[in-house]
Image: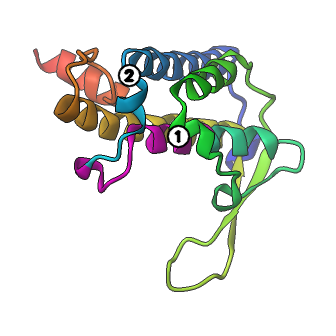
């Protein structure tokens, strides 16, 4: 039903702008961390690191973009690049590269994966490139919220008030002030 809906140029521009600004905000915050702070396992993150959360975000965007031609996306089978979680510079370079890429044209895609830890059976559902881009944006903000907690508990870095906060939450808070 929805794949035939027309998205205005303004909508596409807003998606692209939101992705770009969110990734660049993450980039800027990561640049304020030391290499050690970036890669250190933290109890508050269940012994994961800020770097691991960053790698995870980057790889979802990479999986979406590398799957565009085939139109079959499987985030479970994404390439896991340990360098991105261990080296802050590599991660920030990749965030800049992703943020600098224009959105591709919208099209139908198939999302496939194993969505239960009780079975290896693959489930496939129809989606669209723009829907997956918006999902990746929301997914990034979710991980930034976790990164926010980690940074607040383990460093002296001062974060922007909106780091890791959903745009709808920011708008809601503004409306009730």
Measure how far apart labels 2 and 1 are at the Cα level: 13 Å
Quick one: label 1, few (<14), some, or many (20+) residues within 10 Å?
Answer: many
Which residue is rendered at x = 65% and y = 38% of the image?
61
Which residue is rendered at x = 27% and y = 22% of the image?
170
Residue 15 location, x and y as percent? 59, 23
Instruction: Please report the bounds of the magenta region as a residue range.
Output: 43-58
Q: Is residue 45 left or right of residue 133?
A: left
Q: Going by the picture, which residue comes out furthest to the right? A: 69
Q: Which residue is mark 2?
A: 34
* Label 1 SS: helix
Quick one: label 2, few (<14), some, or many (20+) residues within 10 Å?
Answer: few
Nearer-N-terminus badge (2/1): 2
* Label 2 SS: loop
How many marks do you count on the picture?
Answer: 2
Residue 23 location, x and y as percent? 52, 23
170 w.r.t. 57: above or below: above
Q: Which residue is mark 1?
A: 85
């Amino acid at each position: 039903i929805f794949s035939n809906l027309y998205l205005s140029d303004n909508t596409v521009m807003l998606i692209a702008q939101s992705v770009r600004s969110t990734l660049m905000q993450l980039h800027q915050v990561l640049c304020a961390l030391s290499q050690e702070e970036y890669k250190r396992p933290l109890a508050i993150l269940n012994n994961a690191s800020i770097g691991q959360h960053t790698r995870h975000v980057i790889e979802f965007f990479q999986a979406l973009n590398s799957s565009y031609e085939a139109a079959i996306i499987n985030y479970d089978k994404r390439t896991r690049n340990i360098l991105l979680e261990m080296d802050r510079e590599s991660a920030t370079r990749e965030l800049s590269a992703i943020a600098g890429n224009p959105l591709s044209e919208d099209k139908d895609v198939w999302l496939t994966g194993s969505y239960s830890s009780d079975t290896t059976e693959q489930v496939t559902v129809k989606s669209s490139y723009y829907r997956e881009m918006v999902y990746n944006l929301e997914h990034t903000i979710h991980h930034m919220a976790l990164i926010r907690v980690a940074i607040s508990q383990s460093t002296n870095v001062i974060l922007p008030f909106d780091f890791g906060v959903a745009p709808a939450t920011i708008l809601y808070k503004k409306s009730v002030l």
